[in-house]
Image: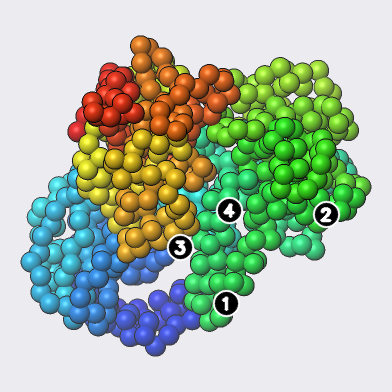
Amino acid sequence: MTKSVETILGELASNYPFAIEPTQRHAWQVQIRHLQQELEPFRAQGKIYFEYDVPRMGKRIDVLLLLEQVIFVIEYKVGEKTYPAHAVAQVWDYALDLKNFHETSHHLSIVPVLIATDGESVPMVLEADVLRDGIYKPVCTNSSGLGVVIRAALDFCDGPSIDHKQWESGRYAPTPTIVEAAMALYAGHNVANISRSDSGAQNLSKTSKAVERVIGSAQQNKRKVLCLVTGVPGAGKTLVGLNVATLHTDPTNELYSVYLSGNGPLVAILHEALARDRVIRDGEQGVRTSKGQARQAVKEFIQNVHHFRDDCLRDRSRPPIEHVAIFDEAQRAWNLEQTAAFMSRKKGVPNFNMSEPEFLLSCLDRHPDWAVVVCLVGGGQEINTGEAGIGEWVGAIQRYFPHWYIHVSPRLHDSEYGAGQVVESLSNRPQVTFDDDLHLNVSMRSFRAEHVSAWVKAVLDLEHEDAQRAWSSIRDKYRIRLTRDLSVAKRWLKEHARGTERYGMVVSSQAERLKPHAIDVRSPMDPVHWFLDDHSDVRSSYYLEDVATEFHVQGLELDWACVVWDGDFRHNEGSWKHHSFVGSRWQNIHKPERQMYLKNAYRVLLTRARQGMVIVVPQGDLGDPTRAPEFYDGTFQYLQSLGVPVI
């Protein structure tokens, strides 16, 4: 800070990517002069960074100060007289991002500081949060208090002095939510820039490149190809699909692609999130864009699969404009019976004789030269009646499209993908290529512990020893707690979530007897508001009033989740019992298919949280035969026996 204000301003301006408004220049001048004054006693001890880029968030930290053993994340509100909650959350988010995703910040003390330059003096409190991971709760101060904050932090925090050069060399390895990732990809980033690349995780860019190779080869050799990408829950399958789609958004290009999903909430949330982000980004560039215009542009390359299907129905001879179609959650496509019933009942098309996979393949087969269908396949993700599983895609190729080539992950043979003997028959087919790069084997959702999905699988498969072994590998990084009191669970969520980390309650769509706890699965909720709106909106997940079911949250994620477990899926005498509530009582579910759907619903619920979850198993009520304690006690005792701590 020995340089003049003008020199520092010039350097900032030359590296700033946006137009510099007078307000921005004034803010920099205030910050520089203030820091020169407040940091005078510490001049020779640290290093300062202005407008520090936070890649995953697409934001810039006003000031990052490395001083002795502490990182100070400083956010200025020039001229502000108060300390608004959104500003506190903003500086906390910056600190969390460094702690979680910047390699050389993992083990350092990080103190977020909000400076309202004209604010009233407030007591200086330096307090570690509940996770005790080296991040301190944000400290609010006015212009005169920064030096006091710095001295207190240096006296309080332990650790060796930070090597500035070593710190700067640290990799930034983010694990974005699907919404954050979609915004980054749409803004022009690639999957390699927004995903982790550590040795413990399958590199998403490797799988994306494998899919790109398949598409390029199909175009060059004029072939039609089915490409099957597999992955564990949260591994990044959707991210791979969105990466391909956002690379090819020009309708005039032969490689023009469309991302398709039957997951209505996911599509609606992505449309709204990308539209909001586009309006903001255009505004920063001085371009006025309405949300309607932005949303229409997004809808062109992210579509509901049923809208795509309906468009192809209008003219059964015309090929779609896209040569490449990416089907997310392809295992959830409808079987012949479900498709025929829907076409007859809703579309007035009698005697429809194709399953959804067969019809969708036939649409791309209309191209005279080449086409690629990319199926993104999750294991154990079928959650609704009539979902055909991935075997129907392979079966349709075998029966009706013998000229198509197949590129497939070898893991499609695994039992959880439900392809069975149909997939085995591929071994004798000459036009099949097995590619290990088409499988994503590690969950990226839970960046604190990559093996949460393995724990959930073992729990649901009643593999007691495997569950205990998986628990021992995640318990120090990923918090799971068990309780019988919903109010305790809500308090736990609020204590653990920091900044704008999102939390919410999730329940099975069959959880009909949680009404005494003010949880009604039939009460309408809007997933767009639930997932995207902030603490101030009563419709958001933060209010812990509206609940989301497996149909709302599949393919999406929370930072912290409260899973409320009803009597529909009960552990009793060493096995799971499956029930649905009909009329005034629980009824046994006997059909294996429906039992699988219920089990998979809980698989979805238990794999939504990135950082931790609390599981609530109610006490039940002796006076209510529909909520008898024995409907819940066995589940609670089973989870407790696996080592999950009770609060």
Q: Residue furthest bottom?
A: 22
Q: Dot 4, crowdedness within 10 Å: few (<14), some or many (≥20)?
A: many
Q: Quadrant of residue 231?
A: top right
Sequence-earlier tag: 3 or 4: 3
Rendered image quadrant of residue 486 = top left
Picture quarter with the C terminus = top left
Name the kind of residue labelled 4 in the image.
Val
Residue assigned mark 2: 314
Determine whether label 4 and label 1 are within 8 Å by CB: no
Q: Nearer the viewer, mark 2 or mark 1?
A: 2
| Mark earlier in primary sequence (3, 1) | 3
Vertically, is 632 above or below 90? above
- Examine the rendered structure and indicate whether residue 556 appears above or below residue 424: below
Badge 3 element: loop
Q: Separation of disc 3 and disc 4 at Cα? A: 22 Å
At horizontal 60% and vertical 66% (from top left) the residue drawn is 295
For the residue marked with disc 3, what is the amino acid?
Gly
Mark linked to residue 267: 4
| The disc label shown at residue 289, or none | 1
Location of residue 66 in the rendering, given as x and y in whole percent from the top left corner: 26, 59
Q: CA distance from mark 4 to mark 2?
A: 23 Å
User: In x, y percent, where is residue 123?
Assistant: 7, 66
Which scheme is used to colour this image of the protein? Answer: rainbow
Please report the residue visible at 68 percent of the width from the left and 48 percent of the height from the top: 305
For the N terminus, the image quarter is: bottom left
Identified by mark 2, the residue type is Arg
Can residue 630 be seen at all in this image of the molecule?
yes
